Image (spheres, grey):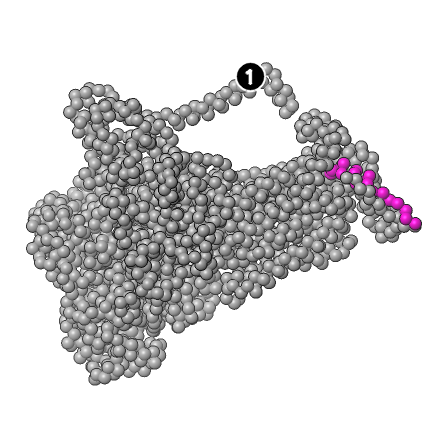
Amino acid sequence: MAGYNKKAETAHVKAEHNQHDEEHFREKHLMLDPLPRGQMNDMVMESMYTTSWKFWVVFAILSVIVAWGLFYSWGRMILEGLGIAGVNRPAYWGIFLVNTVFWIGISHAGTFISAILRVFKAEFRRPFTRAAELMTTFGLVQAGFSIFMHMGRVWVFYWLMPYPNERMLWPNLHSPLTWDLLAITTYLLSSTMYLFLPLIPDLAMARDRSTGWRKNFYKILALGFRGTEGEWSHLRNAMSIFAFAIIPVMFSVHTIVSWDFAAATRPGWNSSIFGPYFVVGALHSGMGAVIMVLAVVRGTMKNMKYFIRPEHFDAIGKLMLIISMTWAYFFFNDYMVQWYGGDKWTHMLLHFHESGPMGWMWFAMLIFNIAIPWAVLWNQKWRSTPWIVFIVGLLINVGMWFERYIIIPISLSINRMPFTWRLYHPGVEIPLGIGTLAFFILLYMAASRLIPLIPVWEVEEGQMAHELKKFGRETVVTVSELE
Amino acid sequence: MIKRFFDWLKKPLGLIAVGITFLALFSLAAYGISLSQQPPAQPVQFPHRIHIGFGIQCLYCHPGAAKGPSAGIPAEARCWGCHNQIVKTQTSLLLKPLKDSVISGKPLQWVPVAQVPDFVQFNHRAHIAAGQNCENCHGDMSKMTVAENPQIFNMGFCLKCHTKVAGENHDLLVKLTDCGTCHY
Amino acid sequence: MAIELKVSEVKMGEAYVGKWGMVIDQDMCTGCQACVAACAMENNLSFVGETDSGYGRSMHWIRIERFWEGSYPEVKMTPNQPMLCQQCGAATCEPVCPAFATVHSQAEQLNLQVYNRCVGTRYCANNCPYQVRSFNWRDYKRPEPLPNQLNPDVTVRRRGVMEKCTFCIQRIHKAQDKAKSEGREVVDGEFTTACAQACPASAITFGRVDNPDSLVSQLARVHGHGVKHLEELGTLPNVTYFKGG
Amino acid sequence: MSDKLSRRDFLKLAGVGAVTTAILTGCGPASRLVKREPYLQMPEYTYNGLSTYYATTCRECAAGCGLIIRTSQGRALKTEGNANNPLNLGKTCARGQATLQGLYNPNRVRGPIKHTRGERLYDTATDPFNDDFADAKSNMDWAAATQTVADALKNNKPEEIAFLMGMAPDHLFDLVTDLANATGIQSPVRFGALSMFESRATLSKASENLFGQTGLPLFDVGGAQVVFSFGANFLETWLSPVSYTRGFSALREAQTKQRGKFVQFESRMSSTAGKADEWMPLRPGTEAMVALAIGRLVSEIRGIPVPRAFSDIDPLDAASKSGIKLEMLNHLAEMFANSTGALAIPGGAALGQSNGLAVAEAVLALNAVVNNFGKPGGVFFSALAPNQTEYQGPASAKEVGEFVQKMIDGKIKVLFVHGVNPFFELPISLQFGGATKNIPQIISFATFPDETALEADYIFPDHHGLESWGYQRVATGSVGSVLSGAQPVVSPFYDTRATADVLIAAAQLAGGKFAAALPFKDEVEFLHSKVTPLINEADGFFSAPDVNTFMAYFQQFGGWWKTTDGRSIPNSADVLNRSLSSAEAEFAGEGEFFFVPFVSPTLAEAGANKPWLQELPDPTTTVMWNTWVEMNPVTAEELGLEDDDLVSITSEAGVLEVPVYRYPAIRPDTIAIPFGQGHTAYGRYAEKRGVNPTDLIGQNFNEAGDLAFAGMKVKIKKIGKKKPLSRLESIMGVYGVGLGEEK
């Protein structure tokens, strides 16, 4: 199987010389490079089983970080109060909500790739829908952690749930936070189900190819899937319903998150464009995260160079470029309209963003989110190179995190009562934020060794649908409608 | 390892172990709940029943109920006013703590049974003035020896009565179900 | 809730009359902090120590703001501005609380903060344009025997709970209870808030704004040029300021 | 009894109830572990849950405002002003509000202690917000303590026994005075840092010089139309701040009369000056010159011949020396001359200079030119308190200095200290600390473990003001004659004993002339003897047939006062015909900056141990919990200083390290430091916080014997370290610091 790796590596170089070669098509495009199904299954199984000592070292380090950053620090904060964090008057919201918004943003990529691209039959999506979908679920877990950390009395979180009680009290449906809670819960549940449905055939595959505790594990999860005609048709129906249904959920979640800010009577927040602006921002950071994950998976996991090829980085890179442009458009729109609004507090705030003590962050945000993607991603060669897009994805994520930091604690520093203006200096938020990041990676690492990261059936389905045909002297790719 | 453990659980011994663990946890929880429902130990086994039997009014010993927020526990001088004339006080073992307390000047430590959390600002006076009787909340003391609470004073208990009393009177309902009426 | 929330019914532009209100004469206020101390003593406010108080975490329910105009030697201190909860008729803090912990009192027309319902999202504080809410960032300690001084009529707040000026609602209730037990209405001036009671310059006046004969209503009429802060936001504040001078 | 029980009651109610709250509700339901102890014998007027109110007198400063304390079940809950008391009419200041934090202070002296000088009285190792640091244990009983005092009285020559007492003219001062008069021990010396910063002696000396009568002038701010204040910080701590604030409020009353104008002359804008319509930052030391120049201009405007008092002054010269433009002087003079109620007040730092007496005379003379004496909005002599025949001011700094000299000379063998903390309040340059080494026995009656108690051989703690009996004469501020009465509102919290009781008992033990001097059973009997003459006085707020009924009313109303105007009118006939000095003040030291120490309006001399007073923002700078030095931003820039930069300030007398506050309203050649912090003892909240500006004040007096505390020049050096100050204000929002280049 090692031969495929080499081929994939060299495919790109060859392509330059031999544009119309059939062999070149096969090397470049996964869909045109079919392998026997059994072999692909074995490759995926092997990738799950292979763990080097490095994996365990990283795993252990991350576990320690999670134990310290997340659980110990959070426990301390619950016992001592939010005083050990950096929140103050007027920056009542700090990095906790920055992280909440950030992780919800990350989670958007999965749905975008696996639902929207599925609905639009973008074929390049096939090998990495699951890798992206996993990010949705695990990202939302971190968002949940962050928002619960943020609460002053997290032990009474259940008061935010609507449940009948003798006090005759319900959550306040006027409050954007209540909408938030409902939206995030809905999104977490539906995206988990949407992760699970396409996973069933792969779990059944893994069940059939494993022994020991893993066999029991997959047996329970596969729900007795045998691959009969009826099962497949039910599964396809369910998936197409979910793929359509989850798209509005995805859009609503980040819109509602944006309403937490837009619905408030604060200078800088009270903006009607925040909904789409936040959705695009979420996709921006989400696509950046997907490309980082793919680069890491391709580089570290066995057999992945066959499934994830430069063509995929190329395709995602194009998407990133478009999203970056859209984000820039919304940013400019928001900034310009607010500036023209002429409100003195908004002016002061916009000025503070640029030239206040955290002004560097504002410029860094623009460079990372706009300048660098535009400068790099226009070049097909660059955007097909994993390490380059990895760095671009990383910078976009940092930039988007900065964007949320500017919107939340920095904007909160300026309000209509100048007597109370004050800067925000993070405290225990830093270990907690690192903890959520480590926990995300930890979950992902564990998942990569527990569930098939590549939807083999989906890849095979694509490969069956694709064909190379000669049209005169030209070799063309044809795709047949499957579903 | 895990598999062996699960296999073991399926064996009779394992099932028994599961059963015992479950029962132990359940009975601990039940014990905890029942403990919280017991009337607490009091320094004197004060029989409300007998005192009410003598025809002593509630307000004789708890006059604060008609005047202000707290009904109050009577000063020992009030107990002693009658009891020092009763021969049994000198001999009864049950009354010894009272006697000792009066002699030593160290007050008895009563444990209140009818309590609301400290974020509830309850006022007895308003309730008495609104025509509520003591037993509506505190139960029929003439049947109790050591005071115990017939019901848990939680918000549902308060609101049930408040909404009932207000009935169709909207202004009264607003006042009686306003958060700020009890919580500040 | 058994009764529906009615905040949304109070719309901007409608004639709104609150119930309790305050008039603050900034020309008289000397900034002496007596009101701040009185409020702290009455309402069991925690002191937070040097580090936290310098980091915007002090628990003052009322603060006295002053700015500077001009530069030396023509510098002037702007009139001291006691800033406290404005008890808005259409408060921005209320609709954003997910738990109804910050809720409008229909009976007293005040913005209540129900400590025991608060889950600590701090949205209300973000959304308060006056920035008058204080959050219990920690369990601030009162070493023994300082707790002896705590007012039993006011709940002692713990960590993770928002708090703010209540217009001394415990005094309102006490006065109402007393009046009711005597079979009469509360008389204007019968009681007042701790800050107004202490103020040596009598810059703060508290009373019923819905009663045209009360002292606050009279003062508002006599002055005639009172300012309600950030009124343009439609918050319908119940505190009127006179800049004077 | 009731106090102890109800304290426990409370602990369990609020303490256990609040602290052991269940997790699920946060504020928590009351715990089932709560125990309640009933009263053994319930006071007949008490009901559980209902408050009882007691009238008493505020002891936080010497003004003598009446208080009503709300108590419940033996606990004092809240301070309210006594609306009957004509001095404060129901109002209080911040310090009065916080008096309960003194009563329930975690660091109090808990019983009589035989003490080694310098030994710590409480643990200071840990965090002040923790519960667990213990005060020193009492190691003797009160019988032994009384015997110690008796021995001290008996075994020393009377003239070698001295009393150093607080500023308040109270019953204890009367008792000690009686004792001194009858036995020949030294007359008690009354002193406080406030009297030093108020320059009381200068004010009364100037009155004596001008009007031929000693007394404390009373300025009717409320009745005036235009008020010129030369350094008098009457809205902060000066003489009787609550009463003067009420006057200010009346001055600004715009509903029924024209709004009065107010001009303040001082080099640093105090919070009083912050309320002024015009702030005149004159050069320190030129106050007398400016006052005389205005006087001259006023008489010119009014078209009267320039009186002798103002004849020597050249307004142009005054203008150039003081830094106030001549047009401005003319404008001010017009304002003063054309007003129907003009008033000029001397006070504060203006008098605390080498020419302080001249300043006071010049400013008082300014009143003479508009002849407002005895008129509404004018100058009066304060009403003498009911059982007082002549004005008795506290000792001036010079007299204290003489007292210290006696100590150094070994002429004092026993020193009793009550109500004053000389180790903290007196400048180091007066050498009180060193002088105590020559005294064999020091007995402190301190309620709190202050610096002086730390250097005493015995500490016999007095009750807190709210636990004690007494009365206090109101020295100034009221229209009528007022004797504010004090009574215990709670029973003593610790094993403390009223100093009056200790002295009476000790005098009985000492026998002889001591016993004869104080022939009383206890403090209350002494009080009865003192108020008995008032029963027959006319015009009282109440009258009673006998002393017991009188005392009952006295307690109920919180004192006794006359309903008539007790103020007397100064004899101003000769004022303008005197020649008045317009000399500039002389400043001690080499430095380039004038140094103005001022009393912190929220802490004053004894507030530092009350945590809520520490957390009150200063009215001008909003700094909490610390000391700062105010410096003009221009000066700071020249010296390369930012906010919070530590600087060392050097005067002839000493060195201090303070963080900088760039204060926009201070002369560039002046710096100012508040007095109130810098304790080395005095409880966990006071200790090791800030610095004491008296360390910089040298031993210079003005002609009236008051300390020339504002007569120093200092040098400033950057240290290069920072000490961030806790401010309530936003440095970004108020000063535009850190917002970017433009604001």
Q: Position of residue D265 (x, y in %)?
A: 31, 71
Q: Position of residue A97 (x, y in %)?
A: 55, 48
Name the residue located 31 percent from the left edge and 55 percent from the top edge.
C211
Name the residue located 70 percent from the left edge and 54 percent from the top edge.
A322
- In-image side of D483 versus D193 (left or right): left
Name the residue located 26 percent from the left edge and 80 percent from the top edge.
D298
Name above or below for residue A108 compared with residue D227: above
Residue matched to label 1: B16
Q: Position of residue D217 (x, y in %)?
A: 20, 67
Is residue D437 visible to us here? no
Label 1 CA crowd tier, 10 Å (few <14, some 14–19, many 20+): few
Q: Which residues are magenta?
A: A454-472
Q: Which secondary structure, mark 1?
A: helix
> Where, by quadrant of the figure, is residue C241 drawn?
bottom left
Q: Position of residue D427 (x, y in %)?
A: 29, 60
> Where, by quadrant of the figure, is residue D438 drawn?
bottom left
Magenta residue check for A457: yes
Name above or below for residue D33 compared with residue D417: above
Name the residue located 29 percent from the left edge and 44 percent from the top edge.
C177
Is residue D394 visible to us here? yes
